[in-house]
Amino acid sequence: MSRASGPHPFTPAAESRGTARTPGGLIVFLNGTSSSGKSSIAGELLPILGDTYFSMAVDAFHAMRSTPPDLSPDQLRRVLLSTWKGFHRAVAGMAAGGNNVVVDHVLSEQWRLSDCVDLFVPQDVVLVGVHCPLPELERREQQRGDRPPGLAARQMTRVHAHGRYDIEVDTGAHGPLDCARQIRDFLPHRPRPTAFEQLRRAAGGARAAPKTVP
């Protein structure tokens, strides 16, 4: 029997109506600038969590893609947009299947955060702010040599602009394993409402607010 006529069981619409849903996996969402240490934290975090987790990084999705070299700037922007949107939906699908996920992402554009807030079950997300002082970011960029100079500096003011996290770590003051342990120890005691719940409520309030007449 076809299922095309009904909503997908993990759509945000089904969750927001309060209908019954299959329990999903936990999403540990690492957000920080390029070179802030998210991948290193994820690598240390998975072995110490004591449960099955999948590591999903947006860079890995970009690496999967074949892109013709003669795309116009507008075409390339559309390809990148589709990649980011597909990544978000892949994460949502894995969690909806009951899988725990550690996400490595850069929320340097507001729409990326809004898309994730709409897609993910907000009480199942632990939003982790990964911080690092700018001089250390610049040192890491130079050492890596595979990022445009100044990329982290350009992202820095935008990545954390939403201002809400469940937990924050500083990779300038602590190594990846120490940061991973901080996150692991926080998970059993995470408070409600979660940062994603607060962000969804704020977004709903902004959409419902009446327009002012000048």
Image (tube, helix red, strand yellow):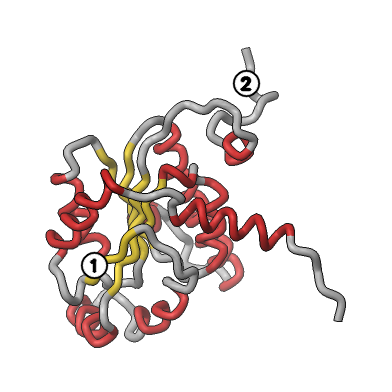
Residue depicted at x 67% and y 63%: 206
Residue depicted at x 49% and y 42%: 121
Up-down relation of residue 53 to residue 45 (above or below):
above
Pick whichever, 50 or 62, lies toward us: 50
Looking at the image, the residue that sits furthest to the top is 1
x and y, in percent, of residue 13 in the image? 63, 38
The image quadrant of residue 148 is: bottom left
Pick whichever, 189 or 56, lies toward us: 189
x and y, in percent, of residue 181 in the image? 16, 55
- Locate residue 136 relative to residue 103 in the image: left or right: left
Q: How many marks?
A: 2
Residue depicted at x 62% and y 21%: 3
x and y, in percent, of residue 147 in the image? 31, 76
| Residue position for label 1 | 37
Residue depicted at x 20% and y 84%: 139
- Locate residue 115 relative to residue 187 in the image: left or right: right
- Mark in the foreground, 2 or 1: 1
CB under 8 Å between discs 2 and 1: no
- Camera sees residue 70: yes
| Residue position for label 2 | 3
Residue at disc 2, secondary structure = loop
- Camera sees residue 63: no
Badge 2 crowding class, 10 Å Cα cut-off, few under 14, some 14 to 19, many 20 or more, is few
